[in-house]
């Protein structure tokens, strides 16, 4: 952060010989303004102003009709607290937040360790590592909407892929209406999130493990550490920052989950609210019910949820950095 | 992470501060203004009931979707013939709302609008801000085809109600949609199955169908509203139009009427007896309808758009037709042929248009029998005036729909609460999905839906409507 | 053979990952009936016509073109505006520098959903709703904060000697940026461009809300609409062909340029 006060060029940078000092200064500022203005104007119009207005709208009963936004104070938030569907949404987002990042990171770490440390002597990469990495990374290349359409078909109870596989290997008894059973639907959605996320974090962790000096692992091997102890004592602590970043990013994905739910699930958001997420509630309230004030209140709630999560997740980092 | 990076934490802290302090910066999206002027009308006469000024220009903006706009252009030719000096500005567009909303705000709307399709205008909101002309005078004017019959009396049941917002008739719907249960006519004929009139007969039929190895019913489980429809129709069959009114008006305990519960029990019975195709509860409309077209199930609930929707996957000779939802018992308050039907393709006349009289007169021509016949022939959809399909060749599907509408007559069921209160609609549909999969009992279903209706009635933030 | 269990684990996940994709690609050359009977049916003959139908009748071609225009336009705009803003913020001292920087980069951490409603009305009131231009501007604006965040760090690390020499040779500020700094920042530009491309190409929420006109649908949005919207004619094999059209070019490009693309895609997380 300190570097911000130590810029490389100054506004009055060395300039062509002729002009006076003052003129050069002006030209420098002229450039700065010209360079920043277009991005800044767009940023103010499409980002700063909408975000700011969302807070204001959340305190009104606006329904989209021009000139008719009445200030209602915190009524929308009081209503949110009693909106059983929105409470379902919070519950589901929290459940996703609790399980999805952990599962994704777990599988990602496991695969990364296998690839990086799984070579013949436990020191080097496994054969075909590159191939695995490429394949694991595929889902990251696909739009979440396309992933949702694909898995929507895969979950079809009658001619979908999942039940097809189960029936083919004789597990007919396990075939289910994956997206239509309230106890399963959210987990079916979560499985897709994990499926599409693992490869990305595996590549990330794999690169991080690769960057750990080989001598550390050598030493551990000489000490007679088993694979698991090496992982727990060496790999994991050294990957702590990466895991934390992964957790923050995946947490934000878990608090969203809109596209998968909106495209794949029954209702959408069903059956019976079992896959409802905050983004879906907001979208429906705004663009189907036309209750823009109330929808904005949902957005504000989602914002504070994200903020609290991020602060909690990053707080840990601060403590550890101080210790280190 | 390199040392000269700004930490995520400090960035987030700054984000929070920004988020909390900028609202005052905001330019406001909720603002708007109003201005407008109108042309003076001409003299009224029996052939010019609204007193249209012959030389006043007319601007017609229509949604150009699946139905096209040729029938509108044909009607415009009639208008030009009648008012020689007039110039008609015709626009066939999509996303009507996005194009016209700013013009309404600026007080400069066109004279006639067909408000249909994605991104259309919010009619309730326009009515509230008095932007739409009350079309009562059009209803009471002589019809184009027969000056002795008022426009009002040429319409199919429900059209006036569908177009009435806050007690004023502002929306004139052109097309007519009917809902029912669909089956393949040849399949039924081959097996000697007759379309049932009562629910016990339906259950007998299902038993027969099941014996042939075909699932009697399937439904569009991903969108449970398809199953809500037969349930509500059966309920109103038993409870009559008074029950419909009570439900629409959110009267206390309206959903506790015995015939509502009986209808819920009937629907639950379908799955209880194993008459639903397994897996239906997870299928989208396309998946369920495709299974039905493939003969994996015999009956499916849907509306009159089904034929068009299934065009590319319907096998030759499938000949789908629509049957009315059977009544629960013989003591039904409505005819056994009662169906759910409603009108769509909304025509509006904006109050601030420059030629309101011309707009009204144009609609009088557009809703004539000839224009309607053209429409039915061209797009294969039922129009909203009586007898418009007489004498034209129709597909088995469309003629079964026309027949069903005719048989139902005034016993046409059209519930309003599903349009007025989308949150209640969602609560009902979610509960129906649970009912059909037998995760809740019919009694629990009634409790849930009644509670949702009560909660809505108590909620002062939602505007309430009343069905007279 | 000691490594055998390891390959089982890795191989298992490779199959879990690749199999659904293979299944979609296989289904794209089946007939509707074959798709609807069982996932294991082998197509009687490959039906390439599914692709023609998807491309023309199901408008996948149109959606693809829309995506190319919108993403291409937005990518160009965000690289240009974001690049120059990042450079200015990284290398010029002026009052408010830090404020402007934070104003840009903090917005990455706000959920898009919060802005959704006012953004919709802002775009609508500017008459840009459902237009490609509107989508390009919004995409570019939403991609700019990360672009600045990433390139800011990059520009700081570049040596100043060459820039100073260029100034002495009479180069203007713009000249220095375009002729000296931009070429030097190339590796960073490539990474961030790939990151932005993937992010924008795969957008769903913004077009869903800001792009209601089916003629202007982008690819992901169009495919989702084909599978969920009611009233469309059902065409299974066409939909799978559409999915394949949406997936294969991206996956092929990935396989060819995997190192770059992995580096670009993970750019956000390794910072």
Image (cartoon, coloured by chain):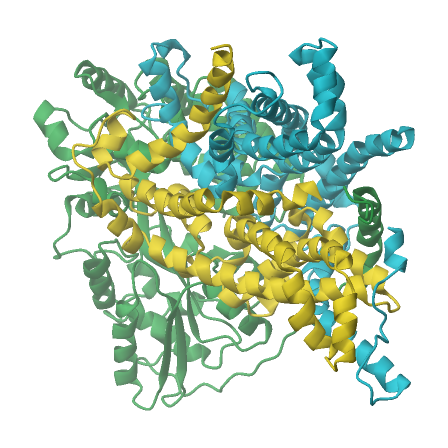
Chain colours: A cyan, B green, C yellow
- The picture places residue A86, in percent across and down from the top left corner, at 65, 35
Number of numbered discs: 0
**Picture residue at 52% right of the left edge, 65% below the top:** C73
Q: Relative to C270, say whether C213 is above or below.
A: below
Q: Is residue B159 left or right of residue A313?
A: left
User: In the rendering, at what x and y percent does residue A242 appear?
Assistant: 71, 33
Say which residue appears at 71% left-offset and 36% top-offset.
Answer: A245
The residue nearer to you, when weighing A136 against A37, is A136
Residue furthest left in the image: B190
Reply above or below: B360 against A73.
below
- Judge whether residue B236 can be spotted in this image: no
Q: Is residue C27 left or right of residue B205?
A: right
**Residue B113 in picture, x, y percent from top left:** 42, 69
Quadrant hosting residue A109: top right
Vertical comparison of B42 with B65: above or below: below
Q: Residue A118 or B426: which is nearer the viewer?
A: A118
Residue occupying the point 55% across, 37% down: B424
Q: Report which quarter residue A159 is drawn in.
A: top left
Q: Quadrant of the N terminus of chain B?
A: top right
Where residue C77 appears, as percent x and y from the top left, is: 59, 66
- Residue B4 appears in the figure: yes
* Observer-nearest of C152 and B373: C152
Q: Is residue B120 left or right of residue A286?
A: left
**In the figure, is residue B192 to the left or right of B100?**
left
């Amino acid at each position: 952060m300190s570097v911000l006060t130590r810029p490389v060029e100054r506004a009055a940078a060395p300039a062509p010989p002729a002009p006076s000092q003052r003129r050069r200064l002006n030209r420098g500022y002229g450039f700065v303004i010209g360079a920043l203005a277009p991005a800044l104007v767009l940023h103010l119009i499409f980002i700063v102003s909408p975000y700011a207005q969302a807070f204001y709208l959340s305190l009104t009963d606006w329904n989209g009709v021009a000139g008719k936004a009445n200030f209602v104070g915190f009524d929308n938030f009081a209503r949110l607290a009693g909106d059983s569907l929105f409470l379902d949404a919070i519950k589901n987002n929290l459940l996703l937040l609790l399980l999805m990042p952990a599962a994704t990171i777990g599988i990602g770490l496991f695969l990364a360790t296998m690839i990086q440390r799984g070579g013949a002597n436990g020191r080097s990469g496994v054969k075909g590592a590159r191939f695995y990495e490429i394949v694991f990374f595929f889902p990251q290349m696909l739009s979440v909407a396309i992933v949702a359409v694909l898995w929507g078909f895969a979950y079809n109870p009658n001619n979908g892929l999942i039940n097809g596989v189960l029936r083919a290997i004789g597990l007919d008894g396990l075939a289910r209406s994956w997206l239509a059973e309230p106890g399963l639907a959210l987990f079916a959605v979560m499985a897709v999130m994990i499926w599409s996320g693992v490869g990305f974090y595996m590549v990330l962790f794999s690169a991080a493990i690769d960057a750990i000096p080989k001598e550390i692992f050598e030493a551990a091997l000489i000490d007679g550490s088993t694979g698991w102890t090496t992982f727990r004592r060496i790999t994991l602590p050294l990957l702590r920052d990466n895991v934390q970043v992964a957790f923050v990013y995946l947490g934000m994905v878990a608090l969203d989950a809109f596209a998968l739910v909106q495209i794949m699930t029954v209702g959408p958001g069903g059956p019976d609210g079992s896959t409802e997420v905050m983004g879906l509630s907001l979208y429906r309230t705004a663009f189907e019910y036309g209750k823009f004030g109330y929808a904005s209140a949902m957005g504000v709630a989602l914002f504070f949820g994200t903020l609290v999560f991020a602060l909690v997740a990053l707080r840990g980092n601060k403590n550890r950095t101080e210790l280190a | 992470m390199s040392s000269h990076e700004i930490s995520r934490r400090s960035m987030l802290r700054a984000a929070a501060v920004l988020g909390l302090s900028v609202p005052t910066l905001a330019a406001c999206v909720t603002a708007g203004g109003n201005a407008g002027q109108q042309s003076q009308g001409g003299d009224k006469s029996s052939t010019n009931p609204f007193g249209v000024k012959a030389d006043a220009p007319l601007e017609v903006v229509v949604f150009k979707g699946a139905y096209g706009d040729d029938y509108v252009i044909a009607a415009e030719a009639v208008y030009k013939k009648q008012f020689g000096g007039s110039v008609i500005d015709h626009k066939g567009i999509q996303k009507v709302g996005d194009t016209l909303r700013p013009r309404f705000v600026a007080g400069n709307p066109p004279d006639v609008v067909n408000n249909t399709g994605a991104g259309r205008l919010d009619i309730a909101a326009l009515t509230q801000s008095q932007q739409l002309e009350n079309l009562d005078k059009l209803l009471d004017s002589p019809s184009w085809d027969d000056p002795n019959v008022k426009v009002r009396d040429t319409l199919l049941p429900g059209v006036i109600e569908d177009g009435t917002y806050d007690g004023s008739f502002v929306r004139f719907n052109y097309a007519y949609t009917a809902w029912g249960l669909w089956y393949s006519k040849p399949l039924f004929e081959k097996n000697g199955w007759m379309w049932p009139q009562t629910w016990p007969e339906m259950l007998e039929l299902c038993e027969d169908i099941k014996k042939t190895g075909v699932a009697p019913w399937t439904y569009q489980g991903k969108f449970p509203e398809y199953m809500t429809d037969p349930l509500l129709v059966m309920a109103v069959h038993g409870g009559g139009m008074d029950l419909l009114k009570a439900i629409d008006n959110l009267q206390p305990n309206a959903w506790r009427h015995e015939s509502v519960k009986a209808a819920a029990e009937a629907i639950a019975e379908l799955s209880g007896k194993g008459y639903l195709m397994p897996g239906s509860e997870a299928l989208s409309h396309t998946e369920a309808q495709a299974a039905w077209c493939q003969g994996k199930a015999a009956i499916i609930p849907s509306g009159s758009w089904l034929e068009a929707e299934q065009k590319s996957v319907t096998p030759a000779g499938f000949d789908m037709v629509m049957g009315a939802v059977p009544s629960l018992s013989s003591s039904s308050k409505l005819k056994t042929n009662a169906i759910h039907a409603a009108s769509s393709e909304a025509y509006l006349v904006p109050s601030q248009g420059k030629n309101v009289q011309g707009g009204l007169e144009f609609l009088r021509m557009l809703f004539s029998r000839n224009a309607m016949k053209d429409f039915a022939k061209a797009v294969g959809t039922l129009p909203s005036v009586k007898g418009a399909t007489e004498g034209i060749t129709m597909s088995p599907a469309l003629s079964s729909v026309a027949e069903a509408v005719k048989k139902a007559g005034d016993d046409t069921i059209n519930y309003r609460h599903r349009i007025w209160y989308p949150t209640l609609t969602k609560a009902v549909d979610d509960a129906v999905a649970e009912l059909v999969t037998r995760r809740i009992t019919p009694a629990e279903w009634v409790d849930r839906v009644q509670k949702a209706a009560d909660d809505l009635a108590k909620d002062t933030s939602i505007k309430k409507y009343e069905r007279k | 053979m000691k490594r055998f269990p390891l390959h089982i684990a890795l191989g298992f996940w490779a199959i879990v990952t690749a199999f659904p994709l293979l299944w979609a690609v296989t289904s794209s050359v089946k007939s509707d009936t074959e798709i609807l009977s069982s996932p294991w049916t082998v197509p009687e003959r490959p039906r390439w016509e599914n692709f023609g139908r998807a491309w023309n009748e199901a408008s996948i071609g149109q959606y693809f073109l829309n995506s190319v225009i919108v993403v291409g336009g937005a990518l160009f705009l965000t690289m240009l505006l974001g690049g120059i803003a990042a450079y200015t913020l990284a290398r010029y001292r002026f009052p408010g520098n830090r404020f402007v920087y934070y104003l840009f980069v903090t917005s990455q951490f706000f959920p898009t959903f919060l802005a959704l409603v006012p953004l919709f009305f802002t775009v609508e009131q500017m008459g840009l709703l459902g237009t490609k231009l509107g989508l390009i501007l919004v995409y570019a604006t939403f991609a700019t904060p990360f672009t600045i965040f990433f390139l800011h760090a990059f520009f700081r690390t570049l040596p100043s000697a060459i820039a100073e020499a260029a100034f002495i040779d009479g180069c203007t500020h713009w000249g220095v940026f375009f002729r000296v700094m931009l070429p030097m920042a190339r590796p960073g530009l490539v990474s961030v461009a790939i990151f932005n491309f993937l992010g924008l190409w795969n957008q769903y929420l913004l077009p869903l809300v800001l792009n209601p006109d089916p003629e202007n649908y982008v690819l992901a949005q169009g495919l989702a609409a084909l599978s969920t919207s009611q009233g469309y004619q059902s065409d299974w094999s066409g939909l799978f062909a559409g999915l394949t059209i949406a997936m294969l070019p991206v996956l092929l490009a990935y396989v060819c340029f995997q190192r770059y693309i992995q580096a670009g895609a993970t750019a956000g997380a390794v910072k």
